[in-house]
């Protein structure tokens, strides 16, 4: 893909995001002129960029959208919801086209009808509002146009219409800057298929020659064609807004020709035209005087039959015979079979471009101050981060080296110097890590910005009224965390709208305001980012949840009895749990909240759900700020080293073997007045060695907190806590859910990091 | 492209491209106050719209039309013929 196209895709996506946000903001505040200007500017830039490429469908839609916005901005029509719908759909269409361009290199040509439909819909909105093109006005314009054409020609058009050709009147008014876009309107007009009559007139009176601007197009092309409407539309597909096409009314010139025999006149004219065609095709062939004479005789007869003057035809014939070329006769036919143009009528939209220019000086976006922000591809940043990760590993090797210098080679001095150097490198590496983290930090608004649109669309579809409140949009977290957060959040929000919030009628009946409130907030807490989605809907009924879980066999009867409300509410996270009675297209596919939880687990986060029946639901996600550096505790078990993520470790204890109790076949111990089940790591990893005890016959135990419950993991011994760059397992090993990944230690050995959430399931 | 004055007639040939409009305008200006200069377009293969409007604005009367029928038809629809 060429760099210009790449840049176009990048900028257009940014532009689309901005447009969607502005459209939604405008819906709340339709009178805001600043917003409208901004919106218009972005769309205009998008259109301009799009024009650089061969994307006619995209261009047409953007152009129609721009026209609509322009009409709104000029106050010709009022902005409303239908308009917002149409514009948002248009932007979706453009986004789809961009996707196609990115994947296939070119937009999907099959989208042309969709593009046409969208453009028509947008234009219809403009016309509905302004009533610009009523049938009566079309008639008036048509009548004015027809007045330009000489009567015999109109008779011929009638004949064409009678023969089922349905001639079209085409007016092409190129925009004044068209030459700068590489357009040649005359050439465009010449290529128009089926032209039977044409005229070129100045769009407005010519300036005096010295003041003439040759590069400001001031031409108006008019033509009558027998081509089909579709052909004409295709022909002018890049400049549809500059073309006015209307069918010629039937019997346009009949009245004028009542005295003569119109059919005869038209037929004679057609025969003369046919002679021209015949002679022209022969122009390159060897000149045959007989053929020319034959043609001239035919013309003379035809013209005589309709009472036309053929005085100079003889001279032309003589000239042609003398030059052995048909050109003079051809010229004669051109002169007589097509009447010279009548007086040009003043063009209807003559001063529109100047007026627009005067209103919008400097409409182009070029004069914005240059941004100091660099746009860098993510892969480049990722590479930098990987390199820094390796730097961390290399740094971790220095203490080993220092130890070896002292122990193995007995050079204490060198060992000290290596340690000093290590301290320096350590400081730099930490700063580098910090810096790259700052680069990768993305505000949560990256995810939040899609919600206004999503909430609006879903709420409209469900017939609910929702007031969306976004808080803490500037809270930042690592790009990977933010990106991975998008899908679970969308799911949660859909759930809230579908199941949580009631319809306006239900809300009023429950004594609440008709408009529901959905709050999505983010804030940072220590090294974690908390995301909260809260609604003031009907809340979750714990009894119903418990019943449902029991009916689905997810909990047993005993659990049903003793389970508290808070615990019951959290049952929705169990796999296979879905309370929706009906499967809707919004949520309720049975992959509900457990998908959310597993996604959040994968990020190293946790989910908490609180609900008060009748008052609403609050869901809290807690996620690490960054996933690049993981803090793990190195432990020893079964003669090997493992890592355990520190964020799960609550405490490390040594439990005397005597205080371990066996409850059925499980082991447990009482710690700080709480029963903690004990699991042996060797047992979980299916190695048959017993866990080693220390001299005091104590078991080394890591107390972990997993999904709110405490579990003791019995191991052989604790080692230090290190910061590592955790690499996910790849290939066949990737399917081993029991491991979160691997990390390289400073001495070059590989540390397997266990994923206790999976291992202890 | 060739544009030159010959015996008081502006003789044009080849393709009158968009870049030639300025030169064409200059030639017509240099010709002075002659109200309706004549032009011989017989050797023209194409006339760009920018050149066309210069010819139109200068009220050029055409003495000879190009050979290409569509081009000739459209130019006839735009420019008067020299009588």
Image: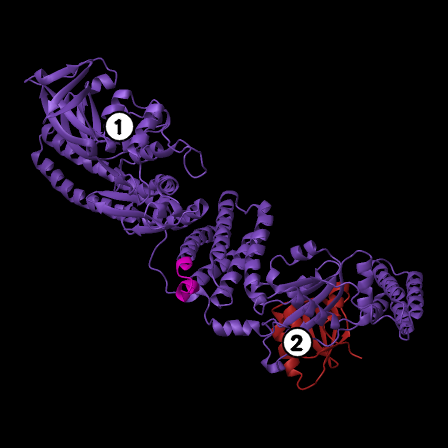
Chain colours: A purple, B red
Give neighbour class at mark 2: few <14, some 14-19, many 20+ (Cα, 10 Å).
few
Q: Residue furthest bottom?
A: B33
User: Which residues, given as a range, are shown in magenta?
Assistant: A26-38
Q: Residue A36 in magenta?
A: yes
User: Do residues under tags 1 and 2 come within 8 Å of each other at their CB atoms?
Assistant: no
Question: Which SS type dominates the magenta stretch?
Answer: helix
**Chain of the residue where label 2 is placed in the rendered structure:** A
The residue closer to the viewer here, A319 or A160, is A160
What residue sits 94% from the left and 65% below the top?
Answer: A297
Give neighbour class at mark 1: few <14, some 14-19, many 20+ (Cα, 10 Å).
some
Q: Quadrant of residue B41?
A: bottom right
In the shown orientation, is residue A2 left or right of residue B62? left
Q: Is residue A383 visible?
A: no
Q: Which residue is mark 1?
A: A757
Q: Residue A6 in magenta?
A: no
Q: Quadrant of residue A579?
A: top left
Dot 1 or dot 2, earlier in sequence: 2
Q: Quadrant of residue A636?
A: top left
In the shown orientation, is residue A123 left or right of residue A575? right
Q: Which mark is residue A346?
A: 2
């Amino acid at each position: 893909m060429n760099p210009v196209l790449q840049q176009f895709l990048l900028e257009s996506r940014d532009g689309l995001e901005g447009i969607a946000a502005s459209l939604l903001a405008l819906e709340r505040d339709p009178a805001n002129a600043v917003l409208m200007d901004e919106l218009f500017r972005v769309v205009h830039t998008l259109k301009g960029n799009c024009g650089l490429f061969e994307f006619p469908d995209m261009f047409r839609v953007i152009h129609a959208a721009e026209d609509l916005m322009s009409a709104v901005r000029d106050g010709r029509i009022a902005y409303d919801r239908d308009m917002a719908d149409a514009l948002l759909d248009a932007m979706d269409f453009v986004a789809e086209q961009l996707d196609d361009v990115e994947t296939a290199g070119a937009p999907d040509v099959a989208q042309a009808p969709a593009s046409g439909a969208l453009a028509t819909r947008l234009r219809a909105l403009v016309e509905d509002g302004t009533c610009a093109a009523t049938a009566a006005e079309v008639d008036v314009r048509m009548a004015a146009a027809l007045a330009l054409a000489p009567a015999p020609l109109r008779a011929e058009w009638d004949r064409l219409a009678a023969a089922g050709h349905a001639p079209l009147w085409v007016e092409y008014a190129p925009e004044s800057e068209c030459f700068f876009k590489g357009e040649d309107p005359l050439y465009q007009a010449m290529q128009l298929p089926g032209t039977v009559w044409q005229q070129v007139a100045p769009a407005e009176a010519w300036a005096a020659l010295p003041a003439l601007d040759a590069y400001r197009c001031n031409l108006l092309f008019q033509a009558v064609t027998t081509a089909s409407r579709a052909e004409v539309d295709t022909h002018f597909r890049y400049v549809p807004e500059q073309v006015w096409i209307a069918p010629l009314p039937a019997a346009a010139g009949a009245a004028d020709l009542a005295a003569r025999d119109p059919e005869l006149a038209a037929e004679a004219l057609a025969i003369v035209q046919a002679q021209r065609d015949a002679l022209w095709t022969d122009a390159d062939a060897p000149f045959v005087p007989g053929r020319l004479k034959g043609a001239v005789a035919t013309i003379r007869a035809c013209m005589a039959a309709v009472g036309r003057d053929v005085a100079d035809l003889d001279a032309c014939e003589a000239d042609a015979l003398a030059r052995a070329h048909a050109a003079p006769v051809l010229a004669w036919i051109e002169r007589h079979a097509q009447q010279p143009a009548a007086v040009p009528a003043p063009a209807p939209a003559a001063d529109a471009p100047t007026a627009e220019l005067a209103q919008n000086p400097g409409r182009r976006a070029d004069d914005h101050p240059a941004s100091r922000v660099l746009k860098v591809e993510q892969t480049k940043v990722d590479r930098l981060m990987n390199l820094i990760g390796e730097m961390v590993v290399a740094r971790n090797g220095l203490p080993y080296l220092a130890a070896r210098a002292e122990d193995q080679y007995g050079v204490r001095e060198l060992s000290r110097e290596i340690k000093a150097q290590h301290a320096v490198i350590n400081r730099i590496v930490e700063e580098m890590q910090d810096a790259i983290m700052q680069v990768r930090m993305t505000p949560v608004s990256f995810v939040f910005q899609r919600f206004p649109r999503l909430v609006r669309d879903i709420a409209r579809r469900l017939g609910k009224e929702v007031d969306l409140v976004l808080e803490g949009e500037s809270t930042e977290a690592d790009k990977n965390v933010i990106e991975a957060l998008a899908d679970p959040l969308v799911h949660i929000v859909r759930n809230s709208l579908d199941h949580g919030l009631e319809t306006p009628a239900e809300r009023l009946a429950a004594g609440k305001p008709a408009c529901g409130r959905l709050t999505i907030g983010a804030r940072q807490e220590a090294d974690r980012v908390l995301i909260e989605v809260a609604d003031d809907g009907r809340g979750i009924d714990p009894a119903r949840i418990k019943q449902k879980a029991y009916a689905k066999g997810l909990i047993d009867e005993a659990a049903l009895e003793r389970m508290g409300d808070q615990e019951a509410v959290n049952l929705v996270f169990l796999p296979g749990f879905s309370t929706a009675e009906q499967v809707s297209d919004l949520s309720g596919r049975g992959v509900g909240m457990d998908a959310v939880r597993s996604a959040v687990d994968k990020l190293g986060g946790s989910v908490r759900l609180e609900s008060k029946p009748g008052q609403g639901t609050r869901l809290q996600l807690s996620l690490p700020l960054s996933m690049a550096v993981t803090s793990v505790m190195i432990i020893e078990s079964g003669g090997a080293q493992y890592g355990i993520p520190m964020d799960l470790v609550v405490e490390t204890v040594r439990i005397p073997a005597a205080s371990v109790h066996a409850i059925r076949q499980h082991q447990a111990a009482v710690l700080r007045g709480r029963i903690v089940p004990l699991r042996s790591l060797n047992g979980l990893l299916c190695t048959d060695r017993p866990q080693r005890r220390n001299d005091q016959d104590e078991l080394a135990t890591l107390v972990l907190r997993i999904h709110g419950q405490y579990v003791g993991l019995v191991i052989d011994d604790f080692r230090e806590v290190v910061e590592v760059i955790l690499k996910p397992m790849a290939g066949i090993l990737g399917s081993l859910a029991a491991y979160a990944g691997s990390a390289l230690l400073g001495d070059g050995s590989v540390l397997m990091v266990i994923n206790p959430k999976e291992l202890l399931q | 492209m060739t544009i030159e004055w010959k015996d008081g007639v502006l003789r044009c040939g080849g393709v009158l491209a968009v870049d030639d409009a300025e030169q064409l305008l200059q030639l017509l200006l240099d010709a002075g106050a002659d109200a309706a200069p004549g032009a011989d377009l017989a050797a023209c293969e194409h006339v760009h719209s920018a050149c066309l409007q210069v010819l139109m604005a200068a009220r050029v009367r055409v003495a000879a039309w190009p050979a290409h029928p569509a081009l000739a038809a459209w130019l006839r629809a735009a420019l008067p013929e020299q009588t």
